[in-house]
Amino acid sequence: MRQEDAWRIESLGDGELLAMVADGLGGHPSGDIASREGIAEMHREFLECRAQAEPLPREWLKHSILAADSHLRVMQRRDPELEGMATTMVALYARPGEFWAASVGDSYLLLRRRGQLIVMNELHAEGGGVTSCVGFHLSRVDLADRLLVEPGDRFLLASDGIATLDSDEIGGLLGEAPDPESAVSHLLRAIEDSDSPSQDNATVIAVFA
């Protein structure tokens, strides 16, 4: 199985953090390039928006995803072999006491709060296919405007390979882990142990408040 996921997590200082996961679409060409380039361009554009400090973080995320989409389309025009490449994207921007998020496609943003696992984004998928994606058919970007972080909150960004596990197992492993690194390790091990014949690539990032 070719690895078509990409991810990045970066501390921006003073409790600020940006986390991103992208899943290049299978069945499309160069999904690995789409996810890698999409993450890189979104990261660059987000930092540029943040440096200008205006408008608000919600718009930083939206602009950055649209810029990633434009970047992938330019690459496709320049190289016909890349035509049709696309990726999902999910991003979390957090700073002390508050967070914003954005997503396109069927990657997940999950929040474990007060013992319950909450799906924070709507998946853009129907009939086994993705209905909105970066680089090919960007029909919608879902944005979570400023939300408050509660003590004990645990976030999980994941490509759709996480769906091998049910919500109780994901929530349990996320809640029991002593730190984000352990949460990621335990989740990936559980996915591997499930030995599902249709298992897709799985990439996860855990962020603990």
Image (tube, rainbow, N blue to C red):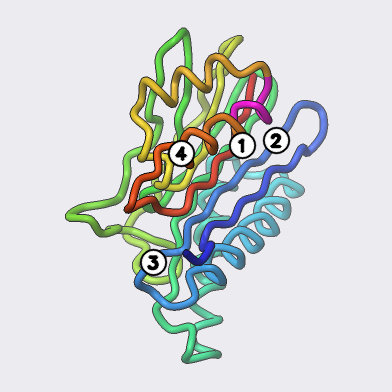
From mark 2 to mark 4, how far is it between C-alphas?
Answer: 26 Å
- From the image, tell me which residue sits under label 2: 17
Task: Mark 2 or mark 1: name the one nearer the start of the chain.
Answer: 2
- From the image, tell me which residue sits under label 4: 191
Where residue 200 sits: x, y (%)? 40, 53
The answer to whether marks 2 and 1 mark residues whose Cβ atoms lie closer than 8 Å is yes
- From the image, tell me which residue sits under label 1: 93
Task: Mark 3 or mark 2: name the one nearer the start of the chain.
Answer: 2
From mark 3 to mark 4, how far is it between C-alphas?
Answer: 19 Å
**Residue 108 found in image quarter:** top left
Task: Name the chief secondary structure element in magenta.
Answer: helix
Residue 181 is a magenta residue: yes
From mark 3 to mark 1, how far is it between C-alphas?
Answer: 27 Å
Is residue 45 or residue 120 the one in the foreground? Answer: 120
For mark 3, does the 10 Å Cα neighbourhood hold few (<14), some (14 to 19), or many (20 or more) residues?
Answer: some
User: Which amino acid, mark 1?
Assistant: Tyr
Q: Residue at x 32, y 39 (%)?
A: 122
Q: Which mark is residue 26?
A: 3
Q: State which mark lies toward you, 1 or 4.
A: 4
Q: Quadrant of the C terminus?
A: top right
Where residue 77 sits: x, y (%)? 49, 88
Q: Residue at x 40, y 47 (%)?
A: 160
**Residue 63 found in image quarter:** bottom right
Q: Which residues are magenta?
A: 179-183
From mark 3 to mark 2, how far is it between C-alphas?
Answer: 29 Å
